[in-house]
Image: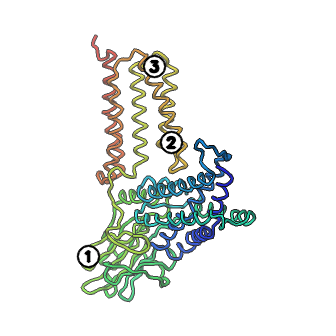
Amino acid sequence: MTDRSRVTAGAWLGHPATLTAIAMLLVNDHLLKRLWPGMVTGKLSDVAGMLVAPPLLALVATLAVQRPAAPAPGGAAAPGEAGRRAALAAIALTGVVFALVKTTPVGARAAADIWALFTPSADVVADPTDLLALPALGLAWVVRRHAVRPSSLPGRSARRARLLVALPAAVFAVTATAAAPIPPSALHVEAHDAVIVVYLGFGRDGLATSDQGRSWHRWTSQPSEKSSRTSCVPGEPRRCYRVAPPLLRVEQSDDAGATWATAWEISPSRQRYLNRIYAPYASSDTARSVAVAVLPAPRGHLVAVANGRDGVALRDVSGRWHRLGLRGYDDLSEQAATPLFDAGEHIEAETGTAYLTALTVLLTALAFAGGWRRSPLGFVAAGYLTWVGLYMMVKGPPGIFGLPFTILGALLVMGGSVGLAAAVVYSSTRGLSSIIAAPLTFAAIYLPFRGWSAGWPDDYGTAVLLAVVLCCPAVALGAHLAIRARGGYRRG
C-alpha cells in the first residue's frame, strides 16, 4: 500500500461521520444498553459498527501492507485505485463476517470467544434480524467517497489530530463491547393487591401479573417485604406452603405446619442437569427454590415460587403447577422454560471420559495383539502421544482459551496415530479382532449418560453404575478375543 492509500484510509476513519459513529458505539454499548436494554439499542450498535469497522480494517490493512508506489504501464494499480480496492475489501469482509456471526451459532460462538479476550463477560447471540444493519455499509462507502475528495481532505496536522483521536477510540469501541448483561434470576416474590410480583435480582426490576400468570408486565417499585420461605393462605391458616433450598421443591401443609408433603418438585437429578446449563463452570447463580408467596383468588388461591435462574413455579386456582421460564427481563412463560431433557447435550465431561477410556482399551488391545514387537519404545511413545493429545482436546479449557490445547492435541493425536499404525503394520500381530472392545467401551460409557440427559435413567448415579456394568462385558469380549488369538483356552 502507498502513502496515498494510508492518507485516504486515515481520512475515512477521521471523517466527522465516522467519529460520530464511534461516539455512538461507545455511548450506546456502555451506557444506553444498560439503561434501556432492548431491540433499539441493540440495532443501534449494529448500525454504528457497520460505519466504524470498514475504515478501521482499511487503515490496519494499509499500515500492515507497505508497498511503495511503482506506476507501471503493465498494469500496476494507481495509488488511488489501491486505496479503493482496500476499502471495498474492508466493506465486503465486514459484511461477510457480520452475516456469519448473526446467522450461524458457530459464528456467534467464535465471535464471543474472541471478544472474551477483551471483555470476559461479553456475549454474542446469533440473530438474523440484525442483518437489517447491513445497508449501513453503503453509507460507509458514501462517507469514504466524501472523505477522500481533495477538497474534503484536511491539512496534515488536522489529519494527524483526528487520527490520534479516532484510531484508539475505534479500537476500543470495536473490541471492548459492553459486557453481557447479568442473566435474570427470580430471587424474591410478593403477593399483594391482587398482583403477584417476581423480582429479578436484588434491585427494583421485576415482573408482575394480575391475570393468574397469563401475561406479565414490568414492575419497578421497591420490594415491600423480605423474602419468605413459608407462606400461608390468607383466611386459611392451616394451608401453608414452603420451599426447601437448595432444592427445586415446594412442600404443602394442611395442618398449620405440623406435617409437610411435597406439592411440586423437580428431581435432584434434573436439577443437576439444569445447573449444568445455568452455571456450567460455577456453583453460584443456579436453579433453586428460594421464596414463596400466596395470593387469594376467586375459587381458590395462587402460589408463586421464585426458583432462581429457572424462573417461577406457579400454582393456579385448580391446583395445577406451571413452570415458567424467564425470557430476559421482559416476560415469563411456559414456552421459555429450559428443557429438562435434551439427549446428548451438556454431557461433555462424560463424553470425553468415554473417548479416553475407549482409547486406553484400544492401546491395550493393540499391545496384546503384538503391535509393540517391532519397536516397543516407539509403540509406547506413539500411544502416549495419542492419549495425551486426546486428553488435551476433550479436557482443555472452554472457548478460545482452549483453542491452543485443541490444536496441539490434534497434532499429537495425528502424529501418535501415524506412529501406532506404523508399529502395527511392521509388527507380526495376532488377534486384531480384539480392538472391537474399544468402540463397545465407548458406547458402554456414552449411552447411559446420553440416556440420562434424555431423562432415562433419571438418577445420575444410576447412569454411572450402568456405564461401569456395561463396560465389563465389552472389555471381557476384547480379552476373550485376544486370548483366543494367542492360542489360549487349550486343554492338557
Report helix, strand or loop for mark 3: loop
- Mark 2–mark 3 contact, CB under 8 Å? no
Give the mark nearest the N terminus, 2 or 1. 1
Residue 161 placement (x, y as % from top left): 73, 65
Residue 406: mark: 2
Give the mark nearest the N terminus, 2 or 3. 3
Q: Which residue is mark 1?
A: 319
Q: Horizontally, is 159 left or right of 241 in the view? A: right
Residue 308: mark: none
Q: Is 486 located above or below residue 363 in the figure?
A: above
Residue type, numbered disc 2: Thr
Report helix, strand or loop for mark 2: helix
Residue type, numbered disc 3: Trp
For label 1, the crowd category at 10 Å Cα-Cα, with few meaning under 14, some 14 to 19 and many 20 or more, is few
The quarter of the displayed image where residue 437 is located: top left
Report helix, strand or loop for mark 1: loop
Q: Is 485 located above or below residue 440 in the figure?
A: above
Q: Residue at x 39, y 49 (%)?
A: 347
Residue 372: mark: 3
Residue 7 placement (x, y as % from top left): 67, 58
- Mark 1–mark 3 contact, CB under 8 Å? no
Q: Residue at x 33, y 27 (%)?
A: 478
- The answer for how far apart the CA atoms under marks 2 and 1 are is 51 Å
Q: Nearer the viewer, residue 470 or 23?
A: 23
Q: Residue at x 42, y 48 (%)?
A: 348
- The answer for how far apart the CA atoms under marks 1 and 3 are is 68 Å
- The answer for how far apart the CA atoms under marks 2 and 3 are is 28 Å
Q: How many marks?
A: 3
Q: Residue at x 43, y 68 (%)?
A: 308
* Front disc: 1 or 3: 3
